[in-house]
Amino acid sequence: MDIRYLKGVGEKRAALLEKLGIGTVDDLLAFYPRDYVDWSTPYPVAGAPYDTRCVIQATVYALASSGRVRGGRLMSRFTAGDDTASLILTYFNNPYISKKLQPGQTYLFYGKAAGSMAQREMVNPAVLTCTQAQAAPLAPVYPQTEGVNSAYLARLVRQALDGGAAARLPEPLPPALLQKYRLWGKAQAVQAIHFPRDMEEVRQARRRLIFEELLALQLGLGLLRGRGKALTGAPMRPVDLAAFWAALPFAPTGAQRRAAGEILADMAGKTPMNRLLQGDVGSGKTLVAAAGVYMAARNGYQSVLMAPTELLAAQHAESLQKVLGPLGVRVALLTGSVKGAAKKALLAALAAGEADLVVGTHAVLSRPVQFKNLGFVVTDEQHRFGVRQRSQLSAKADHPHTLVMSATPIPRTLALLMFGDLDISVLDELPPGRTPVKTYAVTGKKRADLYGFLRTQIAAGHQAYIVCPVIDEGETDMLAVTTYYEEVARPLLPGCRVGLMHGRLKAAEKTAVMEDFRAGKLDVLVSTTVIEVGVDVPSANCIVIENAERYGLSALHQLRGRVGRGGGQAYCVLISDHVTDAVRQRLRFLCHTVDGFEIAKFDLETRGPGDFFGSRQHGLPRLHIADLMADGRTLYAAQQEAQALLAADPGLAAPEHAGLRAAAEKLFEGDTALN
């Protein structure tokens, strides 16, 4: 049922819910809580932890004041407390709170406790009576968006469950699997995940739902892999790479030769190659891809390379032209900026087979892009593209050979589980002559000294990046790139040419800023993490990262890889004023380690996969509840069961597997390769 028809939703709220991915009641029930408020164990006022969300039990003494404040907001302030300390409660724009909180009554309050030891303060805390807390001791906490808070979502879920929605959910898991793993049924698990009676119910519900989601993931990847059993439409004869290697102005690494050999061996097979090439920053993945393009061209086939940004696509086209142009491979560039007659001519050349390789952005997915004889498909920075987009690109040919590349190293055992539809090649060597970037972790107190160092480097002809975590002011403890550009970088770097880059700039504006930086017209680029991928400016030898504690180590390592690309010593400075022991340990590790695989492993072990994978899930479908690292044992079990199911029923065509196939298709958003 469309979410609009639930009581209390309507058109306007439905549009807001759509931002959270909730379009139907099914979507609502699969929008699982991210946490729970445990009302059963409140703190005394003085014992509440500082600046941490918690439940406090206190008696309301009086309504101290009520009225309008600056901006026209209604403010109501109460005095409360217990025998350990007093508590000030402040509510904004809540006209009913003065009737809800009665002097002399004891309540439970949930929120962030600030103030001093003698007098604590809470702003806009949630409130329950003791009776309400006893009836429902665990309250779900949902991800929110503007106009849709957690309490509203809880009311909608309660309405749907009271209407019997959970009982009508299909049960995708066969009885044999439910029995083998002692799993709850779907309806019981969904009811309990939203409104559990205790944490044991949360554990059992999560266990069931995580297994189902990971099984659907592995089945979907297995079905995608199954397409590789078809004969490729681009059969190729083996090619000797001697001429390719000899044409390079430098010697390839052993890892590059090995990975290229694996790729060419696959492409000479009868079934389509489906391979992941992962390697550290600067390990030379593009050169390995070029070897595959060379083989395809020698066999009369075209190739396409899709990159996530116009900037990266342009850089790839430039570097590939240098490598492949002298060997007779015709390279073209197609991005959103190519328009009019130029675009028409390029499309005609592709359709006629007059271009051997086209490098582009999402533009290469568009319907007008047709190839005469496409045989090799490359996706760069594959975590920026979903499985569906990879399939869209491959659908422009008859079972072409596919290579996806990633600069974020993933421990091999986890990669094998994550990318069940791909074989894996690893570049574990860096080209000789690259000097490791010197990395330092400092506090903001060193900022003046740091800027003196930057001025020295700029005077010597170098350039610098300064990275901030957010675009605009929002959270007080994070530096916004727009404010930093105006109030910090320009005043502290007088006489330097400072540019600004962030994700809200139009594509043409971003390209113009980067071209100015690459051309040396700017000394410093103040930016968000949009420079994380694909920026190659040899004269940039310094990168400063503000609020470094906000990033995973793998993300910091990616940013660090933007410098040191032109020879000579490069520097990375991590600035953080929020240094706990855990943060200090992590930043110290990065200062002494340059191996991306070691960094990824440490990041996963100490910070968790949510930070490592982020919301992108490295190109996999978005998971609602499963965690690819923390749920590793369940992931392995799901993979084993998926392999057994697909061995017995390769297309999941049997009636008893219809629910599992539907679950896989839903997870992969109806990917055409599964249909």
Image (spheres, helix red, strand yellow):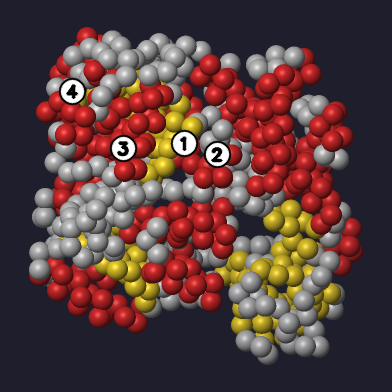
Q: Amino acid at mark 3?
A: Arg
Dot 4 crowding, Cα within 10 Å, few <14, some 14–19, many 20+: many
Residue indicated by mark 3: 257
Please name whichever residue, 299 or 158, is drawn nearer the observer in this view of the structure.
299
Q: Are marks 4 and 3 in contact (CB under 8 Å)?
A: no
Q: CA distance from mark 3 to mark 1?
A: 15 Å
3D distance between C-alphas at marks 3 and 2? 22 Å
* Label 4 to label 1: alpha-carbon separation: 27 Å
Mark sitting on residue 416: 2
Residue linked to disc 1: 424
Q: Residue at x 46, y 17 (%)?
A: 271
539 vs 620: above or below: below
Amino acid beneath label 2? Leu
Identify residue for label 4.
Answer: 329
* Mark toward the start of the polypeptide (4 vs 1): 4
Q: Are marks 3 and 1 in contact (CB under 8 Å)?
A: no
Q: Residue 324, percent across and down?
A: 18, 29
Describe the element under mark 2 as helix, strand or loop: helix
Screen quadrant of the N terminus: top right
Foreground mark, 3 or 2, reads 3
